[in-house]
């Protein structure tokens, strides 16, 4: 504040940011003086008056320019950002999840110059403006999506959350890692007032990296180097032989290998667990499981899930991630039937014979063929033993049947099937088979003896007749 003193005044006057003090005229006692003294006095008074006028003019000039020099506002402070994970920071290999990264602004304004003539800025120096957040994997064995997240302005004493999708590698090594979080923003560095209505902002850009720690926990991870299906066909039971290897980072104890049905796969476990005990990193174990295959399965490869339950490094029983394998399934057991001798006549009792063949993909043990005799057929012998039939084998089977004398001459189809056993002595029945049989008319004499036989019979009859006639006419009396 500027103070200006005026002669012959006795008070102070304030104008704007300036204080002007005036001093009243001082009454002096007049004393006689000489003319020359009066002249010197007038000259002194004139010089003093001129000085006072100059001082007043300067004061008025300062008053005129005072609004232009309104002053400069200075604030001390800036954003102080830090980042951390808004959930657990411990993950397992193969995890797939959304990771919340929380950014906090703890910046403070240390002081601010306040003056009635200074314009207040709209931005504060401790606000992080146009903040973007980028998360990188660093040297951690994981994948980060998506691209940088735009957070916007982050005032002091507030926080914001950016979401990133994380996929940890299936066979990630256990250990501690740091994920770099890059924070890009600007902030108000200085605000200078120019005149009474103009505020000049000056911003600074900041590129800040914060490291957030994560832990990938050790666990058993498995691969299946070898898969072998033993006698595994649609509709029967068989074995699956597996080689299981620990490629993880934890030594499993009291380990048990399990198999489980995969969704709607036709392969279901009958004996689905094998105890293998200690299962250290790098170890392998051979396991055999008994499974059943649905009868509607096709000849192709179906999925099967494999996992290991074990005691981990913390003493807790946990399961390894599922490993899905493919198991080949062969053709179901199937048979065909073709007639060898299967024609009968009405009223006859006849043996009919058929050939049964194993057209499936596995061996049928102790197979037995069976027919169902329906009107106009009857049978007291409707089964025939075929024995063990490997794929492609064929056997003949004969059945004794009787035909009603009024049966219509035509082709009939008798229902037949094959009963058999699998490798585990489970009994199965084949799909229904149609065994064709033909009813034919009784053969005529010509059909029975043929034309040469008929001629021979005629000749014999004629010879006998001629002999009789001859003896009657020419024999002497």
Image (cartoon, helix red, strand yellow):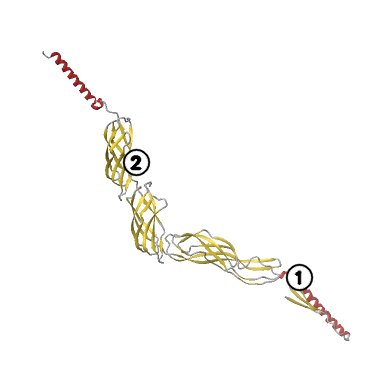
Q: Residue at x 55, y 60 (%)?
A: 149
Residue carrying label 2: 432
For the residue labelled by badge 1, is the local secondary structure a helix, a strand or a loop?
helix
Which label's residue is closer to the chain start, 1 or 2?
1
Residue 205 location (% of width, % of height): 58, 65
Q: Nearer the viewer, mark 1 or mark 2?
A: 2
Cα separation, mark 1 vs mark 2, equals 117 Å
Residue 97 location (% of width, % of height): 48, 59
The residue closer to the viewer here, 465 or 144, is 465
Mark 1 neighbour density, 10 Å: few (under 14) some (14–19) many (20 or more): few
Is residue 348 found left or right of 204 in the rendered image?
left
Q: Residue at x 15, y 13 (%)?
A: 473
Q: Quadrant of residue 403?
A: top left
Q: Is residue 361 visible?
A: no
Residue carrying label 1: 64
Asked if marks 1 and 2 touch (Cβ < 8 Å), the reply is: no
């Amino acid at each position: 504040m500027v103070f200006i003193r005026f002669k012959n005044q006795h008070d102070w006057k304030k104008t704007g940011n300036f204080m002007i003090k005036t001093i009243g005229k001082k009454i002096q006692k007049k004393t006689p003086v000489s003319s020359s003294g009066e002249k010197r006095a007038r000259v002194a008074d004139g010089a003093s008056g001129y000085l006072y006028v100059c001082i007043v003019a300067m004061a008025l000039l300062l008053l005129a320019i005072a609004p232009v020099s309104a002053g400069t506002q200075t604030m001390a402070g800036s954003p102080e950002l830090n980042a951390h994970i808004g959930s657990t920071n411990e993950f397992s290999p193969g995890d797939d999840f959304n990771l919340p990264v929380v950014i906090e602004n703890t910046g403070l304004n240390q002081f601010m110059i306040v003056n009635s003539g200074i314009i207040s800025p709209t931005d504060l120096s401790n606000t992080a403006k146009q903040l973007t957040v980028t998360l990188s994997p660093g040297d951690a064995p994981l994948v980060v999506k998506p691209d940088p997240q735009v957070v916007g302005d982050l005032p002091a004493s507030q926080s914001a959350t950016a979401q990133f999708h994380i996929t940890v590698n299936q066979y990630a090594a256990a250990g501690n890692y740091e994920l770099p979080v890059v924070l890009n923003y600007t902030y108000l560095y200085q605000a200078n007032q120019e005149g009474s209505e103009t505020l000049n902002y000056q911003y600074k850009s900041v590129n800040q990296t914060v490291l957030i720690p994560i832990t990938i926990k050790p666990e058993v991870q498995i691969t299946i180097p070898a898969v072998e299906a033993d006698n595994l066909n649609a509709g029967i039971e068989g074995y699956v032989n597996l080689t299981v290897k620990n490629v993880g980072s934890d030594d499993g104890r009291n380990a048990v290998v399990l198999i489980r049905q995969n969704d709607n796969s036709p392969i279901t476990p009958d004996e689905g667990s094998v105890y293998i005990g200690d299962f250290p990193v790098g170890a392998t174990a051979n396991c055999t499981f008994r499974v059943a295959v649905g009868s509607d399965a096709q000849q192709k490869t179906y999925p099967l899930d494999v996992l290991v339950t074990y005691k981990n490094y913390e003493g807790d029983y946990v399961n390894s991630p599922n490993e899905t394998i493919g198991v080949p399934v062969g053709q179901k057991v199937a048979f065909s039937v073709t007639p060898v001798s299967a024609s009968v006549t009405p009223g006859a009792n006849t043996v009919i014979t058929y050939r049964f063949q194993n057209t499936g993909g596995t061996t049928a043990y102790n197979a037995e063929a069976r027919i169902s005799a329906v009107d106009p057929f009857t049978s007291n012998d409707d089964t025939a033993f075929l024995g063990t039939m490997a794929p492609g084998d064929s056997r003949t089977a004969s059945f004794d049947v009787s035909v009603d004398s009024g049966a219509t001459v035509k082709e009939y189809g008798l229902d037949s099937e094959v009963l058999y056993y699998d490798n585990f002595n489970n009994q199965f029945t084949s799909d229904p088979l149609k065994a064709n049989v033909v009813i034919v008319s009784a053969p005529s004499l010509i059909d029975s003896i043929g034309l040469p036989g008929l001629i021979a019979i005629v000749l014999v009859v004629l010879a006998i007749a001629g002999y009789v006639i001859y003896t009657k006419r020419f024999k002497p009396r």
